[in-house]
Amino acid sequence: MLSEKYHKLRMLCLMIIYSSFLVFLLHRLVLSVELTDEIHGIASIYNIYLGNVPFMTSWDYHTGWCLLTPLFRLFHKVSPNLEGCVLFFRCTYIIFAFLVSVIIAWLLYRKTLHKNLFFLATTSVFYVSASIFQINYNSFTVFVMLLVAVMLYVSDQEKQERLYYISIGILMGMVCITYPTFMIGSVVLAIFIYTEHKKHFGKEKTFYYCLGGILTAIIFMGWIFRAGGGISLFWDGLNGMLSSPHEKTKGAVNWSFFIQTFYRPMKAYFFRAYSGVWIVFVILEWMISNYVKTGKKLWSRFIFLALLMIQMLSEQKNYGSVVLGNFIGFMIFAAFERNKLWKKYKVFFIIFILSILTYSFTSDNKNIMVVFETIGPSVFFLISFLSEIEYSKSSRFFGIIVAILLSFSGLIHSYTYVYRDEPVTQLTERVEYGIYKGLYTTPERKRFVEEMENVLTDYIMPSEKICAVTRVPMVYLMSKAKTCVPQTWDAQFLARGYTSSSPLLEYFQAMGEIPDILIATDMDVPDFYNNSKYEIHEFIEEKYELYYTCEIEGVCLYLWRRI
């Protein structure tokens, strides 16, 4: 009777803690107005919703926006003028992350019967990579790959599980649509499934896994060719994507690439003042392992928890370092505990390595610390899960304390790091209308986005086709117009120093049309207007005339209409 009351009290305390975490997460959800990456993602969904098709009339190298168009369709029915669409998609991110976490907790509970698994699974929800609350090519891939890892981990050796492995194949197919370079990883997983189940339905499970992926690929390819065009347009789109400034920025995979992507970030991480913490941590764990006779496990866990707290409070400027540090610290801790985690949980580590390699060789950031920040939700979950499964018997509260610390660490990151807006203490003004309605930002940015949307809706008709020639993705949503654009980001990458008119002119030629309206600002390219070094000006002068210009909160806006 006493144990039952104790259990209820413990669950009540956990519910209170995690409910308070959720309140803070939802509060952070409405803070900040972002003008580039986040809005680019929503504009990319809108671009597909308008009828553009990946590899055909959309040359976006992240091709999975089509998977989110049902969400945009739902929202558009509720809000035809797209008012509040940014807040809507932030909310869908939280729902998506929690839904995946609930599924993961349910799957793991069936296998392990651990009652704290829901709280452990939600650790990944409270860590938001780069504080961008959006289902994009990064977050979607991380959460789905984590779900795939859990499904493979709990697989029943004694059953064929046809629908189960078809579902895993479908999920991996969706990952490949979102991030095409993960196709290599999907092949590696097929090999893993076969070898892991070689004695028990290995061929069958591999076949059904491949069947799910192939069915997804067939449906996707059938859709893009039916809705988008023929083989000629497909090759134009593929060539445009592979020769885009984004791909050129990544450069060749050579020795210089490895040095910039892996060596320099890792060197900067370990050879600094903070590296002294690692030395102390390793020495203390070694001393506990070899010389402490009583309470050895308790002291070892205390030292690891102290490491988590130190990193949580001292590494906010580069959160990829926190993710990496937590992972390395946990593996060192496990090594001193003499736990062979690799053998028991190899599927998690295989997917972990596949994610690191795929992001590292695909991203133009060329920095492995950015990769660790991206995959942070899966790392936080893995540490919480293994802490509970492996060590809760000898240290009753260890797993849940780790999960609470990591969840709190994720929240601190969200509040101390605001992506491309001011610190949260300065986000005091609520946007009252438009696509950013309901979000809080600075007074200056509030006036900027509200006035910008007013101007665009006044001077652009919804029936007109538009194209932004500088990086200003918000205009696609603010104007409510149609699009004629290879992608909604920065097609020419002028903000990174490129001056070529490619791929805009190649895209217009392939489509056989040009936009009605061209839009530019000096927000990212202050010297753009009338500067002949930017090749697109020759095309503008020949085909268009400037019909409106203004300055909004220090940003110049230019609108050209086709002659």
Image: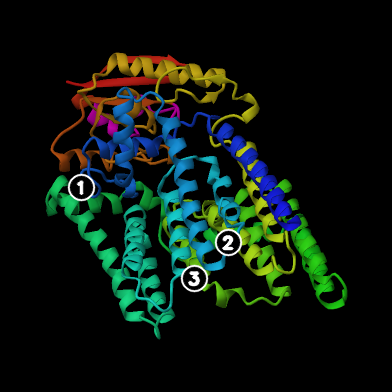
Rendered location of residue 449, percent (x, y): 44, 21
Neighbourhood count class around disc 1 (C-alpha, 10 Å): few under 14, some 14–19, many 20 upward: many
Residue at the spot of label 1: 56
Magenta run includes residue 167: no
Which circle's residue, 2 or 1, is located before the other in the chain? 1
Q: Amino acid at mark 3?
A: Val
Magenta run includes residue 532: yes
Disc 2 vs disc 1: Cβ atoms closer than 8 Å? no
Rendered location of residue 382, percent (x, y): 58, 61
Mark carried by residue 347: 3
Residue at the spot of label 2: 382
Magenta highlight range: 523-540
The residue under the point 50% across, 28% down is: 33
Give the prevailing secondary structure in the magenta stretch: loop
Rendered location of residue 384, percent (x, y): 62, 59
Rendered location of residue 398, percent (x, y): 72, 60
The residue lying furthest to the bottom in this view is 199
CA gap, disc 2 and disc 1: 39 Å
Query: Depth check: 117 or 225 in front?
Result: 117
Which circle's residue, 3 or 2, is located before the other in the chain? 3
CA gap, disc 1 and disc 3: 36 Å
The residue under the point 46% across, 36% down is: 90
